[in-house]
Image: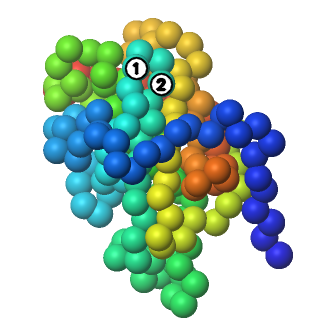
Amino acid sequence: MYKEPHLKNRANVPPYDPGAPAVCDIKQITRMLPHRYPFQMVDKIIHLDAKSIIGVKNVTINEPFFQGHFPGNPIMPGVLQVEALAQTGGVLVLNTVPDPENYLTYFLGIDGCRFRKMVVPGDTLVLHCELLADIKRGFSKMQGRVFVGEQLACEAIMLAQISKKQ
């Protein structure tokens, strides 16, 4: 049976108040990221500073991937949880340039990825990314974690690059 671990240190769980105003709403995210339906995986950003970001993804039964993953037992694919983290991290690194709409973010690598909780319709993903080092020559390395409530659902170290659009 699948065991759902609880975090030992609740201080690592990012705060989420659904009623708080967004730092970046869906319109601002859409201007920054090239992703569109059905692949836009971040609904809003609730925290953004020079080193970290917290995004939110509301998971509904209307997501197109639930038709085949799995009929009668809908579970969000882990690769899409990682994609939601990568898009959140993309907003973080694009925030470092004055004209983010003129740049693209490329996902280069992933290390230490672990899935710790099944994500199902009705869950709200709180996506936390934190830079592990300063961005150099457009390259960034960040720690990403997905939370559902106080439970860690997914975590990974991600590598990305931003580059000017051609």
Residue 150, given in percent of the width and then of the height, sits at 64, 50
Residue 72, given in percent of the width and then of the height, sits at 54, 90
- Give the tally of numbered discs: 2
Name the residue rendered at 47%, 70% in the picture. 122
Q: Is residue 153 visible?
A: yes
In the image, 85 versus 150, the foreground residue is: 150
Q: Amino acid at mark 1?
A: Asp
Is residue 78 rendered to the left or right of residue 1?
A: left
Is residue 55 rendered to the left or right of residue 165?
A: right
How far is disc 1 from disc 2 in space, using C-alphas? 6 Å
Name the residue rendered at 71%, 40% in the picture. 10
In the image, 165 versus 115, the foreground residue is: 115
Q: Residues within 10 Å of mark 1 (few under 14, many from 20)?
A: few
Q: Specify the quadrant that holds the N terminus.
A: bottom right
Residue 5, given in percent of the width and then of the height, sits at 78, 56
- Check disc 1 and report the residue beneath it: 49
Which quarter of the picture shows residue 104?
top left
Q: Pointers 1 and 2 in contact (CB under 8 A)?
A: yes
Which quarter of the picture shows residue 46?
top left
In the image, 40 versus 27, the foreground residue is: 27
Q: Residues within 10 Å of mark 2 (few under 14, many from 20)?
A: some
Name the residue rendered at 48%, 44% in the picture. 16
- Check disc 2 and report the residue beneath it: 52
Is residue 109 rendered to the left or right of residue 3?
A: left
Residue 54, given in percent of the width and then of the height, sits at 45, 36
Label placed on residue 135 = none
Q: Amino acid at mark 2?
A: Ser
Which type of secondary structure does the marked residue at label 1 adopt? Answer: loop
Is residue 70 rendered to the left or right of residue 5?
A: left
Q: Is residue 115 visible?
A: no
Name the residue rendered at 40%, 60% in the picture. 58
